[in-house]
Amino acid sequence: MINAGLSASNSYATDAAGNFRIQLGSIDIGAYEASNTNPDQGATLATSAQSVQADQNSVGSTVYASGCESLIATVAGVGSEQPVRGNVTARVWVEASQPDGFVKRHYEIFPAENAGSAEGRVTLYFSQEEFNAFNATASKPLPANATDAAGKANLRIEKRGGQSQEGAPDATGLPNTYTGGISTIDPQDSDIIWNADHARWEISFDVKGFSGFFVKTQGGALPVELVSFQAVKEGAVVQLHWETASEVNSETFVIMRSADGKKWSEIGSVAAAQTSNSHLQYKFTDAAPLAGENLYKLKMIDADGTFA
Ligand SMILES: [Ca+2]
């Protein structure tokens, strides 16, 4: 336990031994060095909008907990090149209602140094109730109980690079507030563990580069968020324009055309961005439209071959 003082009155970042004086959100003013909360000693899951800073241990892992009993996450520095070190901020948010496509408890872990390339092993914590709320709206479920192997196999982590709203204290932590790259992590199913003693899920996985973290399921959301799709006749040709708000793993847009809305044929394709969370515009020219009415639609093909 840290001997808590007023963090705001801190005038020295480190103590005589070179350790950060503010750990786990509190300043150490005692004679003894702070020791981080052990996650096995009954810490409960943090409530929403908690944030703590700690000095990442150079050996072993560091538990990020608020007030020594409200558990956020555990991080270990791994890898030979740039294991995560130094001052790390761990944040957690729990949405009041079930969001579209991810578990309501979501995280951000961000080291002050080398955030884009630091390597770590992260453990995140969730309740069964949070998984149940996700499952009520998702097409592919997360584990319904400790031994649900299919649910564990479905679980994915979406990583969004950087910090929500560039680290603003009142940042929402929501996916669209990150401007960095988007990637999907498939944790080892054996690293998705139900801790019966503390009634919580513990999910561990390796990352390179830090970010927001969202738990979802494979195929649980469309890979492309389409915001507009227009067809405009220009003389003898038809110009198609469309815009996406975000893309994850998108490979190709296939353009389909129909005269009656029933029978569709493929008339061309356009390469997609693969990964984007900014607005992107695409166009395609149908140089030889059918006589009469032309209907168009897009088939979006994922990098792993699935389509929507
Ligand atoms: Ca897996």
Image: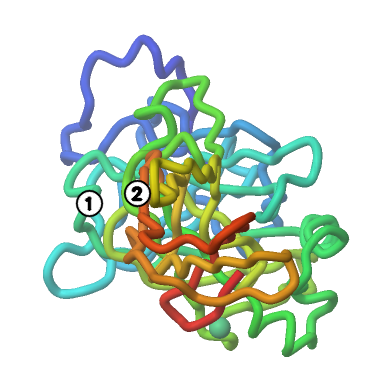
Horizontal side of 223 relative to 199 (left or right) equals: left
Q: Which residue is mark 2?
A: 161
Question: How many numbered badges does the structure rendering display?
Answer: 2
Whether residue 138 is visible: yes
Q: Nearer the viewer, residue 137 or 125?
A: 137
- What's the residue at 72%, 38% (across, down)? 95
Horizontal side of 57 relative to 225 (left or right) equals: left
Q: Is residue 204 above or below residue 224?
A: below
Disc 2 + disc 1, Cβ < 8 Å: yes
Q: Position of residue 172 (x, y in %)?
A: 56, 30
Horizontal side of 79 relative to 169 (left or right) equals: left
Q: Position of residue 288 (x, y in %)?
A: 41, 63
Q: Nearer the viewer, residue 44 or 139?
A: 139
Q: Amino acid at mark 1?
A: Gly
Q: Quadrant of residue 87?
A: top left
Q: Position of residue 69 (x, y in %)?
A: 64, 44
Q: How far apart, in angstroms, are the residues tagged by discs 2 and 1?
A: 8 Å
Q: Amino acid at mark 2?
A: Gly
Q: Which residue is mark 1?
A: 116
- What's the residue at 22%, 32% (across, down)? 15
Disc 2 on helix, strand or loop? Answer: strand
